[in-house]
Amino acid sequence: MKTKGVVIAISALIGTLAAMENSFLFIMIYLCIFPFFIKMKKMKGKELWAILLIFALFFIRSEIEILQNQTKLSGNEEKFILFFQDIGKINGDVLTMEVTDQKSSETLLMKYKIKSENEKQFLQKALFPGLVCKVEGILEEPEVSSNPNAFNYKEYLRRNQIHWLLTPFDFTIKSCQDSPTFITSIKRFRSEGIRYLERHFPKDSVPLAAALLFGSDDLISPETMDDYRELGIVHLLAISGLHIAIIVAIFYQLLLRMGMTKEKCVIVLLICLPLYGMLTGASPSVNRSIMMTMILLIARRWGTSFHISPLDGISFTFLIYVFISPYAIYNVGFQLSFLVTFSLLLSLPFILEKCEHPLLAMLTTSFISMLSSAPILLTFFYEFSVISLLVNLIYVPLFNIVILPLVLISYLSHLLLTAAVDPLLYLLNKMIQWTNGLTELISQFPYSGVLLGKPDPFILVLYIGGFFYFFVLWEKLRKPLWQKSYLLLIPVCLFISQVVLTTFSKEGEVTFIDVGQGDSIFIKLPYGKGTYLIDTGGNQIFDREPWQEKQRSYEVGRDTVVPFLKSKGVAKLDKLIITHGDLDHAGGATAIMEELRVKELVLPDNRKKSELETKLLQQAKDKEINVRFVHAGNQWKSGEHSFKILSPKEGNDESGNNSSIVIYTELGGLNWLFTGDLEEDGETKLLNENRHLAVDVLKVGHHGSKTSTTDLLLETLSPKIGIISVGRDNRFGHPNKEVLGRLEKGQVNILRTDESGAITYSFVKKTGTFWVYRP
């Protein structure tokens, strides 16, 4: 085949994208690269017709998949007979699991609120795959994302052919019957294996053992996952190709030692590999590894007249995978697994084989993996780890030579010998504790990662073309790369180009981030002159019993504001402005100061400090962040833009809403007034001190509360646009109908985050445009 399988895989990918995305665009792309296939791969005649046929075949297959991915339910159904596909996940007081409605054969995502600690303990023991249960509940459509670059949960579920969320009125095992299938029997064995670990293994070793043996990361704490992710080694917590190769090699040798012929060994492995894939959760990396291994085993056993290289093996694996499941191309695990594997296999004969020392080979492998995965990591996570180059030198051997075999031996030995292997479990536990501790320590090193933001399509094309050109030049080198280090300027310049094009863009923006019932406003000045955040949103805290606590509850600062800022390439905030100390304005500040560099924390100059403000001051002190208390008359200037503080008064004795920082500025040819939670008394004092304010855009005070945005304010300021930051279906009834009436009476155009999601004003010099994320 001479690696022409790669060309076939590319044809299949572009055919799939042409159906899933923009048909005209990807057909044009295919026509542009078609001459490359002819010239570089010397393809002609039947081979060219074959790749054209592949393109058409995958285009049609994907179109069929799109047509079939439609719901059969109306949304009004309330009675269901559900087949439990898996064990589900209990996090705090919420049970989440994928279930199949037997009447429509449609997959639903069921979320059940557990009522008591006893019920939780019962469900943890009683739930298993293969149950068929009668359930009554309501169907709801998943929510779409409401902020730019945010994770689109609805689209994610749709690509997994899930269109509805099911909330049961009640749920009891008494309504269930056991109806196992072959697949659920394997999944049941998997769940029992995980429970066995929980019962018999030391507590600290269970999460990692479950991940390496059964492909389940549900037990790994979010903090540990964050540490591994920041170091770029989270792939070690998943079952990978190397993991599969090690296990296949071990069992192959065991079968040979038992007297089995090589031919029979291959047959046994071909039978066992798919079963192992289901046993470990069938993740994209597992599926890719197992399918590729099976293809190569089949070629080795029966391929007498042709040879399949590993590169052709991964290409055919890609074809089979995407043909079965076209939507898999959107899965980040699928993308990383195939792209990194393709890159390493393409580099093997030209780059890796030139590495004379094993350490150099490992470093080169790590570098190729980092560079090839960078565009995907930037697209989904906005940053990638550079310290992974060195960390992988330690962790890859540690996991594959020490921890993985130790976990496997400990588990199998405990099944046979039980308590007799306790010393081995003690050793394993100490090893995992040490590894996790080292990971946490290294992850705290500054500048271990590169935060560039989400690349736009133009930059993404630059990355693809630039990295391809870099690898081509590297392949042609007769000397080691370190002797021609100037070639590294190519990827470095590509990364710098993204920084320059995003950070120093001539375009500025003001974005009202949708943080639910709260405020958070991002301001970016043109040419990198300043990045400011006014308020951070925050979660209402409710008292919960210990059994109700989730592994990690949603926190608006960490889970909404920080990802938004990172997607914009913001690694540093020049000013973090907290208008006042209420939770819905300042609750997310802790996470922001933890995740990003903040040059200055700006607080109102009030004598009374809330408990939250005191906490933020201590955190700022610990992180050596400059703190500035502002009052009316203060201002700062950056380039041609000035920001004036109109409230509170110096040495203000008040606290709460009327002590809010009020900011007045001109951006993009419009005059803006950011009012925090200012209420009627505060508005009156503001107008008395500033009688001739000209305001085009008013940040409506206190989320549209009845106590704010008076007729006097509107008549005096005459704003053209009023922006209300407010949560959907909030319990306060914001925005108040009277306030909306006043705004309409004053002919103010109203924009609301609960209806439109994030609201952005993009501007260049004195002109700009408003647009909403969710029209």
Image (tube, helix red, strand yellow):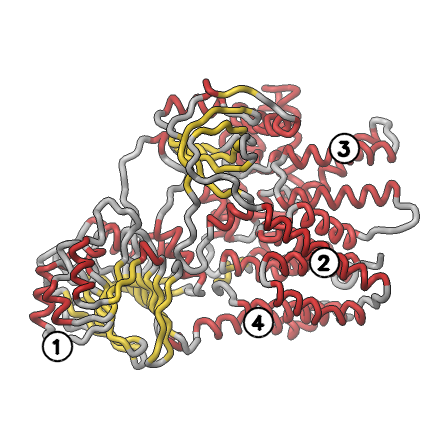
Q: Position of residue 277 (x, y in %)?
A: 67, 37
* Residue in the image at 45% along x and 18% along y: 174
Q: Which mark is residue 238?
A: none
Which is nearer the N-term, disc 3 or disc 2? Answer: 2
Circle 2 sits on which residue? 56
Please name which of the two marks, 2 or 1, marks the residue nearer to the observer: 2
Residue 145 seen from this side: yes
Kind of residue sitting beneath label 3: Ile
Quarter of the image where one finds residue 667: bottom left
Please name which of the two marks, 3 or 2, marks the residue nearer to the observer: 2
* Residue in the image at 51% along x and 67% along y: 456
Q: Is residue 735 above or below residue 407?
A: below
Kind of residue sitting beneath label 1: His
Circle 3 sits on which residue? 271
Which is nearer the N-term, disc 2 or disc 1? Answer: 2
Q: Secondary structure at mark 2?
A: helix
Which is nearer the N-term, disc 4 or disc 2? Answer: 2
Residue 587 seen from this side: no
Q: Which mark is residue 494?
A: 4
Q: Secondary structure at mark 1?
A: loop
Kind of residue sitting beneath label 4: Leu
Relative to the observer, which residue lies in front, 744 or 683? 744
Please name which of the two marks, 3 or 1, marks the residue nearer to the observer: 1
Task: State the CA–CA distance, disc 4 to disc 2.
Answer: 34 Å
* Residue in the image at 77% along x and 63% along y: 350
Circle 1 sits on which residue? 692
Task: State the CA–CA distance, disc 3 to disc 1.
Answer: 81 Å
Task: State the CA–CA distance, disc 1 to disc 4.
Answer: 49 Å
Please name which of the two marks, 4 or 3, marks the residue nearer to the observer: 3
Is the C-beta separation of discs 4 and 3 under 8 Å?
A: no
